[in-house]
Image: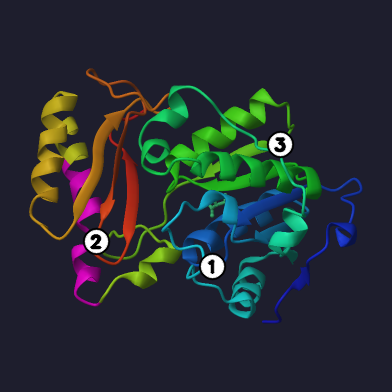
Amino acid sequence: MRAVRIISEPAEIPSTGQGSRGLVPTMGYLHEGHQELIRRAAAENDEVVVSVFVNPLQFGPGEDYQTYPRDLERDARMAAEAGASWIYHPSPETMYPAGFATTVRVGGPLTERWEGERRPGHFDGVATVVTKLFNQLRPRRAYFGEKDYQQLQVVRRFTADLDLGVEIVPVPVVREPDGLARSSRNVYLTPEERPRATVLYRALLAIREAARGGAAPAKALAAGEAVLATVPEFVPDYLAVVHPETLEPITDWVPGARAIVAGRFPTVRLIDNMEVWDR
Ligand code: PAF
């Protein structure tokens, strides 16, 4: 399989003409989850562009911007294998030249809780770069994994609020055979931590099982907390049962209710989520 063409300058971006362009925005170090987004985009569009850009704006102080895994050649091969037409790989200087001074910011409760609270400025960085990618690449559709569930809701919000005219397509979480959600950051896990990292998935499953067995949200949540407690080296940031659009905690089940979890192993911070009440 030949790797795809890599374009680095906005001036070289081909026009879409009459065809539809699907965009899969990524920070690279592609995995099976990204390939699923690309396959879906390839099935629904005339061409698929995969953006590979480790966006400095969405990393906080002390986070892993410098060490974030990068391998463009491997990304180009994996993107081609999944059906991408080309890769967009701008430099940080191209995206944020000297004098750059604009931020796209989603306000309100959607960004105040969960990842927004733990990672101040993170969603501003995501909203700013995704808006720029939409403006540069002019996709008809853009594909986002449900793994970053709050990000997906934030992207939906500013795309609608700013009339960006891009259809946002959510794609379900892709998991390893043992249930761990695929993530570029899974490479940070040590061999000892790796099997224990399924604790997030197992906690979410416990909540879903409890819900299906008739438990109210608070009781179902307690079942998830009990699972998390079995792996003491995992320090939870939050485990919650929330409304699928507002991400507000719920006390009664609503269609599509989601359980969300995040926390830290000594080497890496992980997040995951699951629909626990059917739509
Ligand atoms: O989900 C990601 O990989 C990033 O947040 C995104 C959407 C590519 C923006 O940098």
Instruction: Assess whether mark 1 and mark 3 are in contact (beta carbons under 8 angstroms).
Output: no
Please state which of residues 260 and 42 is positioned toward the viewer in this rendering: 260
- Quadrant for residue 8, please give it: bottom right
Where the N terminus falls, by quadrant? bottom right
Quote the CA–CA distance across marks 2 and 1. 22 Å
- Quadrant for residue 2, please give it: bottom right
At label 3, the amino acid type is Val
User: Compared to 147, does 80 lie above or below?
Assistant: below
The image shows residue 268 at horizontal and vertical percentages of 32, 62
Mark 2 close to ligand 1, CB under 8 Å? no
| Image position of 269 (left or right of 154) | left
Q: Which residues are magenta?
A: 191-206
Secondary element type, mark 1: loop
Q: Residues within 10 Å of mark 3 (few under 14, many from 20)?
A: some
| Image position of 106 (left or right of 177) | right
Please state which of residues 68 and 30 is positioned toward the viewer in this rendering: 68
The residue carrying mark 2 is 265
Counting residues from the N terminus, which is met first, the one under dot 3 or under dot 1?
A: 1
At label 2, the amino acid type is Phe
Residue at 11% in and 58% down = 231
Specify whether residue 205 is painted magenta.
Answer: yes
- Disc number at residue 242? none
Quote the CA–CA distance across marks 3 and 1. 23 Å
Residue 225 visible at all: yes
The image shows residue 170 at horizontal and vertical percentages of 53, 42
Secondary element type, mark 2: loop
User: Compared to 5, does 161 lie above or below?
Assistant: above
The residue carrying mark 1 is 30
Residue at 41% in and 44% down = 119
The image shows residue 241 at horizontal and vertical percentages of 26, 31
